[in-house]
Amino acid sequence: MTRAMHMLAKMFFVIAFIAAAIFTARAAEDDGGGSFLTPFPEGEIYSVTIVGDTFAEGLLAGLLNGLGSDTRLNMQKGVRKVDGVMSGEFEVAMRELEDGLALDKANVVVAMVGEDDRVPLKSSSGRKVAIMSPEWRAEYSRRLDRMMKAVKVKNAGVYWVGLPILGRNDASAQAQGMNEVIRERANLNGFRYVDVYSGFADEAGLYSAYGPDLTGKVRVLRGGDGVHFTEAGNQKLAHFVEKELRRDLNQAKSERAIPLLGAEPEQAKINPDNAVKVPAPSSPAAVEGAAQAPAPKPVIPAAADPSGDQKADNGKVVLKVVGASGREEAQTIEIVRPAIPASVVSLMARREGSSQMGDLLINQIDGGLTLMNSVTAAGNKGPGKLSPSQAPYFRLLVKGERLTPKAGRADDVRWMMQKPDTSSDANKAAAQPKG
């Protein structure tokens, strides 16, 4: 096999490896539809619960001002208090939070905590551990996971708000480090992370107590301590959450219009004209229909793979190339298509309605660190993207199609079939002996 054939075979292997990584990342997602919020909340109204510290109290005031008149929402008037993740009473606070959330019928949870978490950690030996040191960061991650697990019990749509820029430079640096951990843990738990840090910075990216409010008028947004918000600041803080929440509410509404989504009682609520109408068993229509209905035919199940998995199906591609002797030769390349679980195939073919772009690849490394990267197909610029069944990796690895090579790409071997033009004057001149 020529060197070009080796390179082409390696290219197919790389494509298969990348596609397998994307399949693995997608298989970890919940195969429950494209909407972040349930399309069918109990009572047709979304119950919203706020969790956190004094940041969350101000956030609730802003949300009540911005969303209080929205008939789709039932905003709880109080906050489920968690005074601090790094508090010495953390475990007690978590048990109280779990007991409180068990009483709620929350479809939406908005959490913001961290006002008092910039404190040293006291180790089991009594020594103080510096803020954002590796030991402090590991404990902060563990406690955030514990709190997120308590919030996740209700299977609600969770919006976790990060920390804002703060008045002191050292405090802002700590807030940025904490936001890195918060964002990481929120993504791993399937939450929406709401970034507000830069939203309260000036044009130079520095802290400023002043800034534009929702109308564009410059107002005092922060308190004198460089931490808390004014009334106008809380309204702007809530706006970042409102934007995410309204988008997901609209997405959930569009999910309701999909035929056969939800049980028959749910479909009857939103499509009364198309609802299945079944007459009462004793009604004349039911009796007449039963008398006229033909006897049902026995159903013979078709033979099928009980697992639904797609078996491995290797293929071969025959390419005609010009060999070293100048003659046309046939080279055969085997394309390996591994077995694919049915869950992965159905996941790739299902309707994708999520507005989040790309695939999140996650890997745990030594030292308690997590690597994350978002992989998006080239040319994917928004809602007009290809359906999953038309994506190149789906066509290649699932459907077994050979993709049409593009000019100049590694799999374009037409240049190897082109014989040199020996009739040109330049080639003739080059063939003449020199001297």
Image (cartoon, helix red, strand yellow):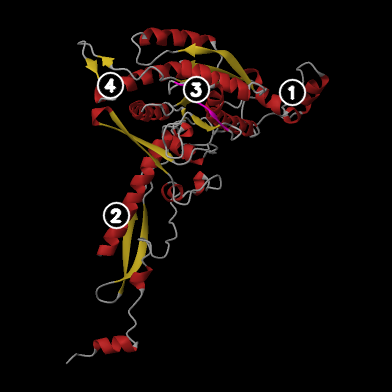
SS type, badge 1: loop
Q: Which residue is mark 1?
A: 278
Which image quarter is the N terminus in?
A: bottom left
| Sequence-first disc among 4 and 2 | 2
CA distance separating discs 4 and 1: 63 Å
Give the answer, above or below, for where 189 lies relative to 309. above
| Sequence-first disc among 4 and 1 | 4
Q: Which residues are magenta?
A: 218-224
Q: Label 3 sits on what residue type?
A: Phe
Where residue 410 sits, quadrant-wise, is bottom left
Most extreme residue toward the left, as rendered? Answer: 435
Q: Which mark is residue 10?
A: 2
SS type, badge 3: loop
Q: Position of residue 210 (x, y in %)?
A: 50, 30
Q: Which residue is mark 3?
A: 229
CA distance separating discs 4 and 3: 27 Å
Q: Is residue 223 magenta?
A: yes
- Mark 4 vs mark 2: give the one in front: 4
- Find out whether the residues at labels 4 and 1 contact each other: C-beta distance under 8 Å: no
Q: Which residue is mark 4?
A: 136
Depth order, front residue of 86/412 = 86
Disc 1 crowd rating (10 Å Cα; few below 14, some 14-19, many 20+) is few
| Sequence-first disc among 4 and 3 | 4
CA distance separating discs 1 and 3: 58 Å
- Mark 4 vs mark 3: give the one in front: 3
| Sequence-first disc among 2 and 1 | 2
